[in-house]
Image (cartoon, rainbow, N blue to C red):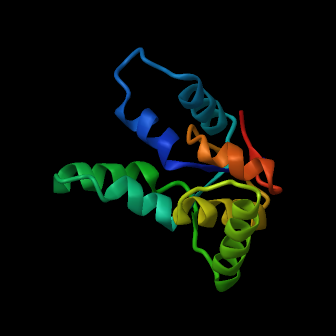
Amino acid sequence: MNVIVDTSVWSLALRRKTGQITPPVEKLIDLIQKEENIFLPGIILQELLQGIKSPKDFSRLLEKLSPFPLIEPHRKDYIEAARLRNHCSSKGVQAGTVDFLIASICIRHHCFLLTTDHDFNSIARCSTLKLLT
């Protein structure tokens, strides 16, 4: 199975206190233990790194994320993200530009999306985006 893990889940996993495991984090741990194909879009990598002030913490996080192959968007992803946004908007669904880009990448790469961001539920209802629950 191919999976993209959204920033919302990575943030929960990386900031959790010992003993506090939410269901999405539990699912992420399970995916890693089962050696599923977990991909990391560049925009999610940027979102995770951009709030880190300490160079040491920045390097540590970069190291933790290094095993996950990076997916870079292509021109077609941006075009399809805009098309998807327009389609969803016509159905009354609103979400952020980055969310539509992530959804487009997931769809093109046939990846499930593991997320806690409810905007993706709305996007999935009017597209072929597959969410991992």
The answer to whether residue 113 of the structure is visible from this angle is no
Where does residue 124 sit, x and y in percent of width and height? Answer: 75, 49
The answer to whether residue 19 of the structure is visible from this angle is yes
For the point 19% across and 52% down, the residue is: 56
Q: Is residue 89 above or below residue 22?
A: below
Where does residue 88 sit, x and y in percent of width and height? Answer: 73, 60
Q: Quadrant of the C terminus?
A: top right
Q: Is residue 24 above or below residue 21?
A: below
Where does residue 117 sit, x and y in percent of width and height? Answer: 56, 42
For residue 25, side relative to residue 1 (left or right): left
Q: Quadrant of residue 90?
A: bottom right
For residue 20, side relative to residue 35 (left or right): left
Count numbered badges in the picture. Answer: 0
For the point 70% across and 70% down, the residue is: 86
For residue 124, side relative to residue 81 (left or right): right
For the point 60% across and 47% down, the residue is: 119
Q: Quadrant of residue 116?
A: top right
For the point 69% across and 43% down, the residue is: 121
Where does residue 34 sit, x and y in percent of width and height? Answer: 69, 35
Residue sitting at the far left:
54
Residue sitting at the far right:
128
Residue sitting at the far bottom:
75
